[in-house]
Amino acid sequence: MTYHPKSEFMRVMKERGFIADCTDYQALDEALCEGVVPAYIGFDATAKSLHVGSLIQIMMLRWLQKTGHKPITLMGGGTTKVGDPSFRADERPLLDEAAINDNISGIQQVFAKYIDYSEDVDNGALMLNNAEWLDGLNYLEFLRDIGRHFSVNRMLAFESVKSRIDREQSLSFLEFNYMILQAYDFLELNRRYGCLLQMGGSDQWGNIVNGIDLTRRVIDNQIFGLTSPLLTTSDGKKMGKTADGAIWLNADMRSPYEFWQFWRNTNDADVGRFLKLYTEMPVDECDRLGALEGQEINDAKVILANAVTTLCHGAEAAAAAEATAREVFEKGGVGDDLPTLELSADELGDGMSIVQLIVKTGLAKSGKDAKRLIKENGAKLDDENLTDAGLMVDAAKLAQPIKLSAGKKRHALVKLAE
């Protein structure tokens, strides 16, 4: 990007590495300089929580508001019923309305930590649901009034669709309609709330451009699109996914300690970049910390973990996670904040195998994985190598909590419920 932005928002986006592409840098920048710009990002309700992969979009909305503009978080109560096919190899499983609403309730919890929804300020954020206008659409009217503006030839040329067809993977008519519905969202948000900008990951570029084109054709308004890069870690892994599953943002799906530990385990090469994207530390300080080496880069990772966890879970949770990490890793202790499995006397019965406990704590996905972990000397019981996959744990062994470990970085406690 060679454009030198005048608006504070675009300057922050550029300096911190948030921009992949923009439909019109100069015109958007001028609009941002002229007054409060409402901008939205859509979040489909495919799970009860968003994960770290969505955090870059949440931070974009946070910076938008911090620089004086109005964020709109759009819940996909309507579009989730169809499912976004972008760059997927198969169709998403369809969810019923109750499951979608349940997921929306879970997802909404995280936004208030990053964004201010106060009604008494000019740029207070809006939380909307596209089911409000999508659920009541008349199909024939929609085809006639909206569908006529879309060229199937052009839609087939979008990379998200083309890649699926080139691999000879089925793309249902239901999924094909998703991009039309997302485009219609942008049109409705512009009509109802004066929304001028849609943001999203670079995989949403085609959908965003469709919305801009539709709005121009139907009501002749100029609106804009801005995408962020699809992040992978320096070793090529998709952001937000680990060997033991997604790093969820809701504390009831991924504990603050595990969340903190994910950031503490960042690759050296990613520290500076992640500090810019996921914290609000000054850019110069992010660059300085990212350039450190040896033990000092590990100290920078602790700073990263504390800053990101403070934003998501609060300062107390970040401090507790760091204290637990020091207790576990530096002193060989148990730590107060480790993920804990509590078993009732009825659940435990006459005893439970160590393999079952490893699976129940989430340290392994299956009994087969747990047995392999033990066989390869990757499992520990109270910091001692675990070699017997047949070991049974009864109430006597749980008179005191036991600590299970998978490798050097993942730990959990098992104890009897009081």
Image (cartoon, rainbow, N blue to C red):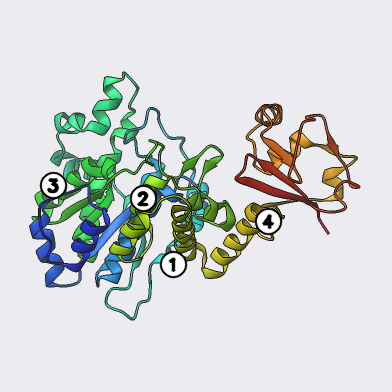
Residue designated by label 1: 112
| Residue placed under numbered mark 4 in the picture | 331
Q: Secondary structure at mark 2?
A: loop
Give the mark, 3 or 4, whose residue is nearer the N terminus: 3
Q: Nearer the viewer, residue 13 or 147?
A: 13
- Sequence-wise first label, 2 or 4: 2
Q: Is residue 36 left or right of residue 416?
A: left
Which label sits in the foreground, 2 or 3? 3
Q: Residue at x 36, y 41 (%)?
A: 232
Task: Indicate the amino acid at tag 3.
Answer: Asp
Q: Amino acid at mark 2?
A: Asp
**Disc 3 to disc 4, C-alpha distance:** 60 Å
**Quick check: marks 1 and 4 in contact, CB under 8 Å?**
no
Mark in the foreground, 1 or 2: 1
Disc 3 residue crowd, few under 14, some 14–19, many 20+, Cα 10 Å: some
Residue topped by disc 3: 213
CA gap, disc 1 to disc 2? 26 Å
Q: Which residue occupies 60% across, 64% down? A: 320
The answer to whether residue 304 is above or below residue 231 is below
Q: Is residue 160 above or below residue 341?
A: above
Q: Where is residue 88 drawn, in percent x and y?
A: 36, 32
Identity of the residue drawn at 45% across and 51% down? 50
Q: Secondary structure at mark 4?
A: loop
Helix, strand or loop at label 1? It is helix
Which residue lies most toward the top here? 168
Residue 196, x across and y down, in percent? 18, 60
Q: Most extreme residue toward the bottom, as rendered?
A: 120
Q: CA distance from mark 2 to mark 3?
A: 23 Å
Specify whether 291 is left or right of 247. Answer: left
